[in-house]
Image: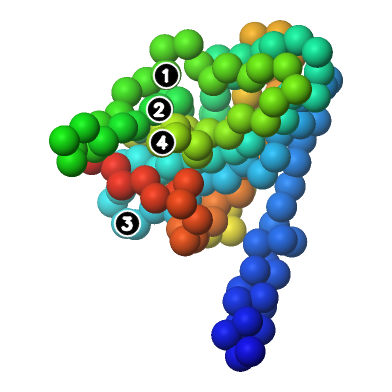
Amino acid sequence: MRNLIASLLFLLPTATLAHEFKAGSLLIDHPKVIETPPGAKVAAGYLTVVNEGEADDRLVAIESTAIARIEMHSSQIVDGIASMKPMENGLALPAGKTVGLGEDGTHAMFMDLTRQIKEGEKIEAVLVFEKAGRVPVVFNVEKRSAQKNERHEHQQ
Ligand SMILES: [Cu+2]
């Protein structure tokens, strides 16, 4: 019982941090970046997009004036070795579906960092969609949690 209460208390701050953005029939849920250790050059970001419309769309780029470069990566493990590569065609958003950067080894890679990114910071960025256009969002910087979609060990 004590464990249950402890885990409920642990979950509360996460709930209050939830945030979302709307753009036409797209709902962008909780963009976040995982805080970095000192000296790290990259950080992993995640978000979920719900396409409530009847037409497919596509997330083609993520831009931020605060970050030198943001790429969308897919990663895979082959013979025990993790590798990742840019998602050449961006993230497909089929009509009526929910898709996340964070599923199947995908993530947003915040690159060439010039300073440590710390929990509690907010990073303004623009999501560029094929049809919905440019949508301003805010990535919350959070500590790494135990969720499986955050288990991203970077090689660089
Ligand atoms: Cu990556």
Q: Label 3 amino acid?
A: Pro
Compare residues 68 and 109 and report the one nearer the observer.
109
> Residue 23 appears at what percent x and percent y?
79, 24
Residue 34 in sight here? yes
Mark 1 and mark 2 lie on one chain; the one further toward the N terminus is 2
Q: Residues within 10 Å of mark 2 (few under 14, many from 20)?
A: many
Mark 4 and mark 1 lie on one chain; the one further toward the N terminus is 1
Mark 3 and mark 4 lie on one chain; the one further toward the N terminus is 3
Q: Label 2 amino acid?
A: His
Report the Cα–Cα distance between label 3 and label 4: 24 Å
SS for callout 1: loop
Residue behind mark 4: 105
- Image quarter for ligand 1: top left
Mark 1 and mark 3 lie on one chain; the one further toward the N terminus is 3
Compare residues 20 and 55 and report the one nearer the observer.
55
- Residue at image x 57%, y 85%? 3
Residue behind mark 1: 87
SS for callout 2: strand
Front tag of 1 and 3: 1
Against 124, residue 74 (above or below) is: above
Specify whether 147 is left or right of 76. right
Q: Residues within 10 Å of mark 1 (few under 14, many from 20)?
A: some
Circles 1 and 2, Cβ within 8 Å, touching? The answer is yes
> Residue 142 appears at what percent x and percent y?
54, 56
Q: Residues within 10 Å of mark 4 (few under 14, many from 20)?
A: some
Compare residues 67 and 144 and report the one nearer the observer.
144
Q: Label 1 amino acid?
A: Met
Among the 4 quarters of the image, the one containing residue 77: top left
Specify whether 156 is left or right of 134. left
Residue behind mark 3: 38
Among the 4 quarters of the image, the one containing residue 94: top right
